[in-house]
Structures are given as C-alpha cells and as structure tokens.
Image (tube, rainbow, N blue to C red):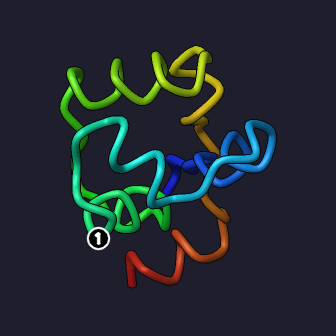
Amino acid sequence: MPIAVDIDVMLARRKMSVGELADRVGITPANLAVLKNGRAKAVRFATLAALCEVLECQPGDLLRWEAEDAEAVDLAEL
C-alpha cells in the first residue's frame, strides 16, 4: 500500500504504549493496532485529529506516501 503509517515512530518518541494511546484517544487497542500496522482501509478525521492531539504532532508525522515498486505493479497488471 502506498500510504505508510508511522504511529509506532511517534509512540517511541513520546515514550507511550499502544494501550495508553488507545485509552487517551478513545479507541480499542485492537483498532489502533490495525491502523498502526497499516491494515486499515480508512481512518476518520476525528480519530486522526485525536491521535495528533494526544501525540502532539501533525497528520504528516503519522501518515506518508510511498511510491509502489514499479516492477510489482507491472506484474500485478498481468
């Protein structure tokens, strides 16, 4: 997926656990894990805003775009 999630980087910088972040944001640790591991299909702006508020960061600190491997894309189109 071309969108990479860097929540784990911000957690390390803030010395915060996944459980603490989930509690402070108001989502389940399981749902936070899905988002953190890049398996989420979508994220609500309210959740993104809450993550940024708790982690004191910008959305770009949590999400970034990565180009897909051109060879992998070519093979997938076959």
Which residue sits at x=61%, y=17%?
A: 57
Which residue sits at x=77%, y=50%?
A: 12
Q: Nearer the viewer, residue 20 or 40?
A: 20
Q: How many marks?
A: 1
Quadrant containing the C terminus in the rendered view: bottom left
Q: Is residue 11 left or right of residue 21?
A: right
Residue 64: image quadrant is top right
Q: Is residue 3 left or right of residue 65?
A: left
Q: Which percent across, then down, holds residue 3? A: 50, 47
Q: Is residue 35 above or below residue 65?
A: below
Q: Rate crowding at label 1 as few (under 14), some (14 to 19) or many (20 or more) other CA atoms within 10 Å.
A: few
**Residue tagged 1:** 30
For badge 1, the amino acid type reads Ala
Q: Nearer the viewer, residue 55 or 24?
A: 24
Q: Which percent across, then down, holds residue 43? A: 24, 40
Q: Which percent across, then down, holds residue 11? A: 67, 46
Which residue sits at x=67%, y=65%?
A: 69
Q: Is residue 54 left or right of residue 43?
A: right
Q: Is residue 4 above or below residue 71?
A: above
Q: Nearer the viewer, residue 4 or 54?
A: 54
Q: Which percent across, then down, holds residue 65? A: 59, 38
Q: Is residue 17 left or right of residue 12?
A: left
Which residue sits at x=35%, y=57%?
A: 32
**Helix or strand or loop: what does disc 1 sit on?**
helix
